[in-house]
Image (spheres, rainbow, N blue to C red):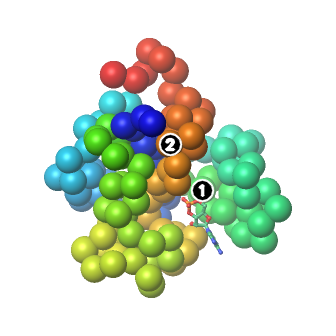
Amino acid sequence: ATNRTFTMIKPDAVANGHIGAILNDIIAGGFKIVAMKYIQLSTETAGAFYAVHKERPFYGELVNFMTSGPIVAAILEKDNAVEDFRTLIGATNPADAAEGTIRNKYAKSIDANAVHGSDSDENAQIEGAFFFSQFERF
Ligand code: CMP
């Protein structure tokens, strides 16, 4: 098992001015930032990143939304990183996200849900490697 997870601060949270507050919550939650970049995804890149969701009805909307503005992508380190980060961000649908979680505080809808968090150690590894080379991870 790895002690790293991958996250993105999504276009809604960036546009609404929440980058700083979300990074504060992440650091206060005990996570160390081991890689980070500020980028806008192309349709091709977002489509490839979300290829696992290709057959889902929300795929087109998801790719559209994720390319609508810049994002912050980061790799985070902490014991039990994947599970603890999912606890910190709350449920995918902000309507179901526990009080005080990042999605409860900053997300508006299931699409505009402020942040991404890897759902397994395996995906954390794949997603981190998708965005960062070995020279960009510290
Ligand atoms: P995330 O888990 O970061 O990556 C897939 C995204 O698809 C998810 O966040 C949601 O923002 C979005 N999404 C939209 N509709 C759904 C749905 N019905 N189930 C799961 N994810 C959805």
Of the residues shown, which amino acid type is indicated by label 2? Asp
In space, the residues marked 1 and 2 are separated at their CA atoms by 23 Å
Name the residue that disc number 1 marks. 66
- Tell me which residue sits at (42%, 35%) in the image: 2
Q: Nearer the viewer, mark 1 or mark 2?
A: 2
In which of the image's four quarters is ligand 1 placed? bottom right
Helix, strand or loop at label 2? It is helix
Relative to 37, 130 lies left or right: right
Residue 69 locus on image (x, y percent): 54, 54
Helix, strand or loop at label 1? It is helix
Is residue 22 visible in this depiction of the protein? yes
Of 133 and 10, nearer the camera is: 133
Residue 122 locus on image (x, y percent): 56, 40
Q: Which residue lies furthest to the top in this view?
A: 135
Q: Is the N terminus in the top left, top right, bottom left or bottom right quadrant?
A: top left
Q: Which of marks 1 and 2 is nearer the N terminus?
A: 1
Residue 43 locus on image (x, y percent): 72, 47
Can you tell which quarter of the image residue 5 is in? top left
Is residue 107 visible in this depiction of the protein? no
Mark carried by residue 121: 2
Can you tell which quarter of the image residue 97 is in? bottom left
Q: Residue furthest bottom?
A: 95
Q: Which residue lies furthest to the left in this view?
A: 28
- Tell me which residue sits at (68%, 41%) in the image: 45
Of the residues shown, which amino acid type is indicated by label 1? Met
Residue 7 locus on image (x, y percent): 44, 48
Judge: label 2 CB < 8 Å from ligand 1.
no
Q: Is the C terminus in the top left, top right, bottom left or bottom right quadrant?
A: top left
